[in-house]
Structure formats: structure tokens, C-alpha cells
Amino acid sequence: MLCRALLLLGLSITAITSQAAASKSGEELYRQHCAACHGYDGNGGVGVPLTLPDFQYSVTNNYLKATIRHGRPGRVMPAFPSLSNADIKALVKYIRRWAPGKPFRYPVTPVLGDAKHGQQLYQQHCMACHGPLGEGGKGTGLTFSRPRDLPIIAPALNNPGFLKAASDQFIKATLMNGREGTPMVSFLKQGLKEQDINDLVVYVRSFEQNPLPKEQKPLEAKEATIAFESSYDLKTTIANLKDAAIGNNFIIIREQTLDEGLVEAGKENPQQHIIYFCNFGFLNQALAIDPRVGLFLPCRITVVEKDGKVMVYALNPSRLSPLFNNSELNKLCHEMNDTYVSIIEDATL
Amino acid sequence: MKSRFFWHAVILGLLFLPGLPVIAEDLLMARVPMTFPEAMLKLQSTLKKYNHTLSRVQRVDIGLTAKGYKTDKYRIVFYGQADEIRQLADEYPQLIPYLPHKIAIFAEEEETMLVAVNPEMLFQADDPNLQAIMKKWHNDLQLIFKDMRQE
């Protein structure tokens, strides 16, 4: 009886709070979901600056809504499938306050042209910034604790999120007019004719037919943890792991028990032993790609002795990688995964 | 027996957790409108407020700078509740590499960024006890981040 009453009470609270969540204002939603990357003032950071007047006037509300809904797979901007349509509308309204006035409206008619000619023009005029396959500029606009040299990174034109959000006429207008405050220039001013631009649009649209290159796809890994049983006792396994880490160009930076700092000194459990190690060059490279990789840090292997068995555990970087929605991390995570396995195998077999 | 009580308490506690919107974000991020030293102090007091102990701070920036790399302030904060961490490590060894919990904190000019993994996205388990733990862990992080954003 008591359990039922508690359950009912719990469900009522959930229903009330869900309603409260549904009525959140655009500002609240922006602060919660967008400000971390785009800044409280919309000036950008990880994400593109949202306040550029040229951006505000050239993107449609539908483009913004589709971008929020679908994100940019592999390019950091996450999708928000759980936000309601009302939430997304409120967010767009909030973003629009940075440029009062009506944004441009594009006709819905598709652009017609010659994709082959568009491809030639793409290679001449677009490839240097947007990449040979439309994969976008290197880096993801991430700045954080590092200096940035451009306000935005050239977007990935082959990204399914971009292609869903951008209409033909929107792409055409961007090519015709350029985007002030960014390296994107007007190709009319660069001497292209309107038909050339149409051909380019048709070529960009053709990216929809091509599967994403392997390196842009998220890694697939089921298990969040790498686990091995050691053939040695705890002490030997720890010594072997340290040797193996050093042999793989890491420096041992710290050793401690799992509960150190949480329990009174002297009462720690010595059968749960953590070895922290680092390769600073690798770390610097990873932070340059995505400063959020601190969540992988420091490199660590934990050795646990329980019921006469010695087990070795490490996080699985390949499982963590998709959570960052940054395909540039895939290679590093894969490499790190192999390194963990190699160190543990060397130490335990 | 003690363990059964623990999980019942976790599940029951979840029914009464302060309501937060359920949004399936893979990473939890917050921009804190404070300089790094202020945000670091605030994070320590916020962890305490939610009954967590800060177990240690990894000074990533110090290590990088010592090796000649340029970086702004960058730390990893480890925290948890001793009993809970011990229980989780005993019953769910697959969680061990993720214990104690951690939050990355780093400077972005005059503001500070916080990042943590959404544990519900990391461990999509069939085991209802484990699901409840992940939900609690996620909920704790959301509360901490909400406080840090000063909402």
C-alpha cells in the first residue's frame, strides 16, 4: 500500500516537472543547451558565432530548426531529438533577438544544373576550404583554451545534417552573396555566372547520394570498459603494467588506491590500485582536436584483486568517442584503444 | 542485505529527485560565467552541497606547461561518496575505470567550461539496478551543472 502511494506520488511529481520543463523559455533553453558552445552572448566558441548579421539575415528559421533537431553528425554540433517543436521554436526566437528584423525567405524551388560542371568548379573554387569530398575544414571550430585564427571553420557540405537543413536556394544565395565576417566570399564577385553557381549547388546536393567516408563515421564499440584477467599476482601485475606503459612511450605520473581522498588516510583498499600515465605530446594533440577530451584523462589502468583473481580495467576510448560527435577524434581514440590493449596484454599474459 | 537496502534506497530516492528535463545529451556541458579560480571554488562548494567529497584534482595544464606546451587552466576534478564508490566498484566492476566520478573544468577567456560524460549514454544496461544508478549519477551531474550555471 505504502509502495503504491509512493509510486503515485513519484509519478505525480514527474508529471508536474515535465510540464514545467515543457514551458521553459527560449533563454532558459539556450543557457542550458547552447551557451556552452555558442556563448551566452552568441559570439561563438566551440560553435559558430550566431550574432554575425550576415548569418542572421541569410539563414531561415527552418534552417535553424533543422540544425537544432538534426545537428551535424561527426562535427560536434549535437542533435536534439528530445526537444519538443515548441522548445525549438522558442530557441530560434531567442537566437533571432541578436538581429532584429526579418530574415531572408527563399523560394522552395529546387535549383537545376549540371553536376559534372559543378564538380569542376568545386575543385577550383571550394575544395581548398571545404575539402575534396565536402568534409569541411580541419578542426571543428573548437577554441576553448587555445587561440583561434578564424571566426568559423569551413562547414562540412557533405554532412547529412547540413544537407537536411540547407535548401538549394539557401546554398545558392550563400554562393552568390558570400558571408561577411567569414572567409566565404561572393562567387558572383569572383566572376562566376549564375548558371555556374546553379551547377555548384547541384553538385553539393549530389553529396546526399554518397555515403560518408569511413573516417567521418562514428566508431562502433559496445563495451565501455576494457577488462582483462591477469596471470600474475597484484604486485607483479602492477609492476608489469608500469613497465609496459613506459615501453609504449608513457610517463608514470601517479599511483593511488581507488578510494584515496574519499576515505580516511590509512583506511584505503590497497587491492584496488590505479596507475596514471601520460604521453604529453599525444595529450597536446588530442586537446587541440577537442579540448573536451579531458574526460579521457589522465590515461589510467586500474588493477583489482578480488577473490584470488587479479583483474585489469581501462576505459574504452572507442566507446567514449561517439559521445563527442567529433569524427576527428576517431583515429586518436582507435589508437588509444589499441595502446591500452597492448599495454594490458603485455602486462597480463 | 545491506546491498538490497542500498539499491532500494537508490530506486526510491529517484522517485523524489528534483525534476529535471530528460534530454538525451551524450556530453553534459556548462559554461560558467566566472573566471577559472572562481569557478573552481564554486565547483568545490557545489560538490559539497550535494554530499560529494572531492578526492583530488589533476592539474593537466601544469603537466603540459612543464613539457613546453601552451595551454590555459585545465583541471580534472574527481569526486564521489565513499560508500557509493566502494559499493559500485564491488558490484559493477565494469564501472571501475569511471570511478571516482570526474568533471573536466577549463578556462575559456573570462569564463569557465565544465564537461562530463552522460553516464546514461555510456552504460545502456538492461539491469534495472544499474539503470537506476546511472540515472542518479546523471541527475547529480545535472544538478551540479545547473548550480554552476547559476540558474
Image: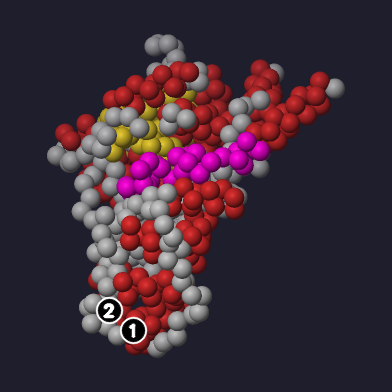
| Closer to the camera in the image, A24 or A114 | A24
Q: Residue at x 56, y 48 (%)?
A: A87
* Mark 2 residue type: Leu
State the image coordinates of residue A167 (x, y, percent, origin top left).
Answer: 47, 71
Q: Residue at x 69, y 25 (%)?
A: B12
Is disc 2 surrounded by few (<14), some (14 to 19) or many (20+) residues within 10 Å? some
Q: CA distance from mark 1 to mark 2?
A: 7 Å
Which numbered marker is on residue A188? 2
Q: Is residue B92 visible?
A: no
Have a look at marks 1 and 2 and say if they share a chain. Answer: yes
Residue farthest to the right, as pictured? A1
* Mark 1 residue type: Glu
Question: Which mark sits nearer the N-terminus, 1 or 2?
Answer: 2
Q: Is residue A24 magenta?
A: yes
| Closer to the camera in the image, A331 or A177 | A177
Label 1 marks which chain's residue?
A: A
